[in-house]
Amino acid sequence: MVKPTPARAAERGFTYLGVIYMVAIAGIALAGTGVVWSFESRREQEKELLFVGEEYRRAIVAYANATPGAAQGGTPVFPERLEQLLVDTRSFPAAHHLRRLYRDPLSGKADWQLLRREGRIVGVASKDTRRPIKIAGFARGQEDFAGASSYADWKFIAEVSAVAAAPAAAAAAAK
C-alpha cells in the first residue's frame, strides 16, 4: 500500500475544485440559455397572438358584412357564439368566415375573453395578465396596443367603420 504524500493530496484537492468550478460554470451557462429560450418563446407566442387575434377580428367583420341586407345599408349583425364564425347558416350555401377556432397562444386553451356589445361578440382578447414584451411598433389597426400593461389589454375588436366600409368598397369595386 502506497502512503499518500501531502503533494498528492493537494493535487487531488485541486482537481476536485476544478471539477466543481466547471460544473458551476456549466450551470450558469445553462441558466442563461434557459432565460434566452424563455424570452424567445414568449416573443413567438406574442406574434401568434397578434396573428390569431387579427384572424378573429377579420372573421367577425366578415360575419357582420354577410348579414342579409347589410350591403344595402341594413344593420350588420354580429355573432352570438364563436362557432357561428365556422359555419354561417344565415345564407345558402353556408359561409365559412373562420377555418377553425383558435386557442389562445399564451394559455394554450380556447378560453378567450369575449368582448360583447348588446349580447353579440364584437371582438376577443387574451385573459393573460402578464406584461407584454412588445410595447411599440405595432401594425396598422393595432396602435392601441402600444404601452399596454397586460396581454388582456390587446383587444381585437371588429370596428363598426370596417364593417360598414366593406360592403361599400365591394359595391364600388363591382362598378
Image (cartoon, helix red, strand yellow):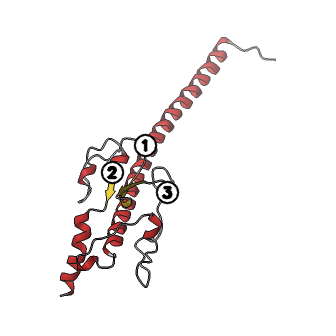
Location of the C terminus by quadrant is bottom left
Tag 3: amino acid: Ala
**Residue 54, image quadrant:** bottom left
Give the mark nearest the N terminus, 2 or 3.
3
Height in image: 172 above or below 82? below
The picture places residue 106, in percent across and down from the top left corner, at 45, 50
Q: Which residue is disc 3 drawn over?
A: 110
The picture places residue 63, in percent across and down from the top left corner, at 36, 71
Q: Which residue is disc 1 drawn over?
A: 36
The CA distance from mark 2 to mark 1 is 24 Å
Structural crowding at the residue carrying mark 3, measured as other residues with C-alpha within 10 Å and reported as few (<14), some (14–19) or many (≥20): few
Q: Which mark is residue 154?
A: 2
Asked if residue 19 lies left or right of residue 35, the reply is right
The CA distance from mark 3 to mark 1 is 27 Å
Q: Which mark is residue 82?
A: none
Q: Nearer the viewer, mark 3 or mark 1?
A: 3
Structural crowding at the residue carrying mark 2, measured as other residues with C-alpha within 10 Å and reported as few (<14), some (14–19) or many (≥20): many
Give the mark nearest the N terminus, 2 or 1.
1
Disc 3, SS: loop
Give the mark nearest the N terminus, 3 or 1.
1
**Between residues 63 and 132, which one lies in front from this camera angle?**
63
* Identity of the residue drawn at 36% across and 41% down: 131
Height in image: 120 above or below 136? below
**Between residues 16 and 143, which one lies in front from this camera angle?**
143
Tag 2: amino acid: Trp
Height in image: 126 above or below 9? below
Disc 1, SS: helix
* Identity of the residue drawn at 25% across and 59% down: 141
Q: Nearer the viewer, mark 2 or mark 1?
A: 2
